[in-house]
Image (cartoon, coloured by chain):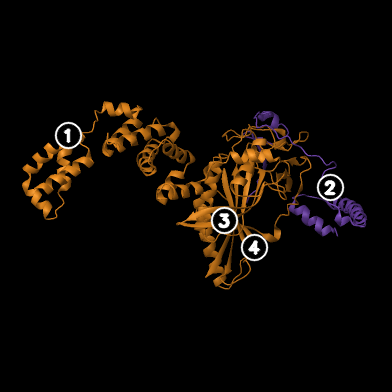
Chain colours: A orange, B purple
Amino acid sequence: MYKVVIGLEVHCELKTNSKNFSNAQNDYSETPNIYLDTVDLGFPGILPVVNKEAAKSALKVAMALNCETPDEIIFDRKNYFYPDLPKGYQITQAYKPMGINGYLMVNIDDEDIKVDIHDLHLEEDTASLDHFNDYSLVNYNRSGIPLIEIVTEPCLHSAKEAVAFLESLRSVILYCGVSDARSDLGQMRCDVNISLMKEDATEFGTKVEIKNINAFTKVKAALEYEIERQTELLNSGGTVIMETRRFDDEDMKTYSMRTKVDAVDYKYFLEPNMPPIKITEEFLTEIKSEIPMLQYERINLYIDQYGLSRYDATTLVKEKKIADYFEDTIKGGADPKLASNWITSIVLGHLNKYQVEIDQIYLTPDMLVSLIKMVNDGKVSSKQAKEVLYKVLQDEKDPVTIVKELGIKQIDNDEEIRAMVVEILDANLNLIEDYRNGRNVFDFFVGQVMKRTRGQANPALTAKIIKEEIEKR
Amino acid sequence: MITKEKLKNYAEKLMFNMNESEYETLMNEFDVIMEQMDLIGKIKDIEKVEPMTFPYNIYVNQLREDIAKDPLTTDEALQNAKEVKYNQVKVPKVVG
C-alpha cells in the first residue's frame, strides 16, 4: 500500500465590474471580442493599473483562509508563448502574493482536518481558444479577468479529502461574495498534483500534475484513476515519471501531455509597469470587517450553541443567505431547533420545488418567528402550522391573515374536550380493554377528537384528558 | 555560458524561428551583455546590495476604482489581426 500525497492549485475568477488591469468589462458573453481594452490585448501605449475591488477580494479570501497578508502589493511577469496570452506574459504574483501560510479547517465524516495553504495570489485570466480542424480562434473577452489562485501544501491524502477541501474552499469564496465560483462556467477550476510514497518513506514520490479540471466530480475521478495507475505502475516495478497529464472526461482517464524534461521555464521577473502598491493597516482592517462568519464556524456554532444535528447544521449553511435567514429567525426569538426544522423541511423544499432563492420568497424570518410563537402558545397545532406555512408561501399573505382565513382556532377548553372524550370512550368500551392489554389504540382516540373538532383541539391537552379519563375507569 | 545550443533550445521553447545569421548576431550581443555582468560581479560586496527593481523608491497608494467601460470596439480591436474569422483572431492550430 502506498500513501497518497495531493496538492491543489485552484483558480477562481473574481466577480468585479472591470478587468484586473484595465477598464474593460468583466463579464461572460456568447459574443466574442466585445469586452476589450488595449491592456488586455497587449497593445502598447497604455499601462496596467490594479483594480481596487480585485485587490480587496483577493485579500479578503486570503484573510478568510487565515493567511499572513503583505504590506505592499507587487506583481511579476510569467513569460510564455501561446496565442491565449497576447502580451507574451501573464501578470501574476510570484514572490510577494496576497497571502501566505494560511489554512482551512475541513470537516470530513465528523472529523476535522487542517489543510495548509501555501499562498494565494492575484493574477489575470487568459483569452479563450476555440480549436478547429486546421486552425484556432482567439476570443479575448476573458483576457485580463481577475483570477485568484489558491495553492495548498501537499497535505491531502485521498480523493475524498481533496473534494471536501474544494467544497469548503468554494463556500469560503461564496461567503466572501467575491465570485459565483461556478465550475460549469469555468469560474473555478483546478490543477492537481499527486504522488505516491511507501508508507514508511521519508521523501515524497515523483509527482504528476493533472491540468485544468473544472468539476469537483472530475477531480475525484481523475485522482482515483491516477492513484490506481500509479499504484499498478509501482507494483509492477515501474517508476512514475514527472509529467503533466490531462483528464479526459469521456473515458475518465488521464493522458500524458508533456514530461518535465521539456518543461517551460517561465522566467519570472518583476512587472516593471506597476510600481509597488502600499497596503495600509486601515485598508486591511476595512476588508477584514467585511468577512462574515464562515461555514465551518457556523456549523460548530449551530451544533454547540443551538443543539442542532451536524446534518441540519450542514444543510443550513450550504448557502450564506439561508444561514443568515436562519440566524434572523433566532434573533427574532424563535427556538433554534424549531426554526431549523421548519426551514430545512418546508422552506428549503419550497425553494427547491420552485427554483427560487430564499430572498425572493414572501415568508420573512419575522413571519416564521410569529408562526413558531403561535405553535408554542398553543394557538395553532404544528399540523395546522404546516398548512399555514404552505399557504403563506403560495398565496403570499402573512401568517396571521392565513390563520384567520383558514378559520383556525384551537380549542383549549378543558370541559369541551373532556365531554367529547367521555362520549368517545363510552362508545368504544372494547377499545379501552384493548388499550389496557397493551394494544396501541391511543391514537385512535386522539384521532376521533380531531375528527370532531376538524383538527382544532389542542393536541397536548387532548392527549392529557384521554389519559386521565381512561385511568378514571 | 551562453552557447548556440542553449539559444537554439530557448528559441524552440519560445517558438522562434531563427536563421544562422540571427544566431550569430545574438551570440555577439550576449558576449557584450555577459562581459558587463562580469564587470558588475567584480564590484566589492555586491551581494550585500538589495536588487533595485525600480529606479525610484516610490510607492503608489492609488488603486483603480472598479468601473467598467469598453474602450475598444470589436472592429478596432481586430483591425491589426492578420486574419479574422467569426469576429475572432484566426491563428494556426495550437493543439494536436
Query: x%, y% of residue A375?
Result: 30, 37
Q: Residue A92, position in %: x, y?
A: 70, 45
Q: Please report contact status of discs 3 and 2: CB closer than 8 Å, yes or no.
A: no
Q: Hey, what amino acid is under mark 2?
A: Met
**Category of crowding for the residue at label 3, using alpha-carbon neighbours closer than 10 angstroms: few (below 14), some (14–19), many (at least 20):** many
The x and y percentages for residue A268 are 75, 50
Question: SS for tag 3?
Answer: strand
Question: Which chain's residue wears label 1?
Answer: A
Label 4–label 3 contact, CB within 8 A: no
Crowd tier of the residue under label 2, counting other residues whose Cα lies within 10 Å: few below 14, some 14–19, many 20 or above = few
Q: Is label 1 or label 4 in front?
A: 1
Q: Secondary structure at mark 2?
A: loop
Asked if labels 2 and 1 share a chain, the reply is: no
Are the residues under badges 1 and 3 in a single subunit? yes
Q: Which residue is mark 2?
A: B52
Q: CA distance from mark 1 to mark 3?
A: 59 Å
Foreground of the two, A335 or A51: A335
Residue that badge 4 annotates = A242
Disc 2/disc 1 C-alpha distance (Å): 88 Å
Residue flagged by tag 4: what amino acid is it?
Met
Give the mark nearest the N terminus, 1 or 3.
3
- Identify the subunit bearing mark 2: B
Which-is-in-front pick, marks 4 and 3? 3
Q: Residues within 10 Å of mark 1 (few under 14, many from 20)?
A: some
Q: Is residue A199 above or below residue A126?
A: below
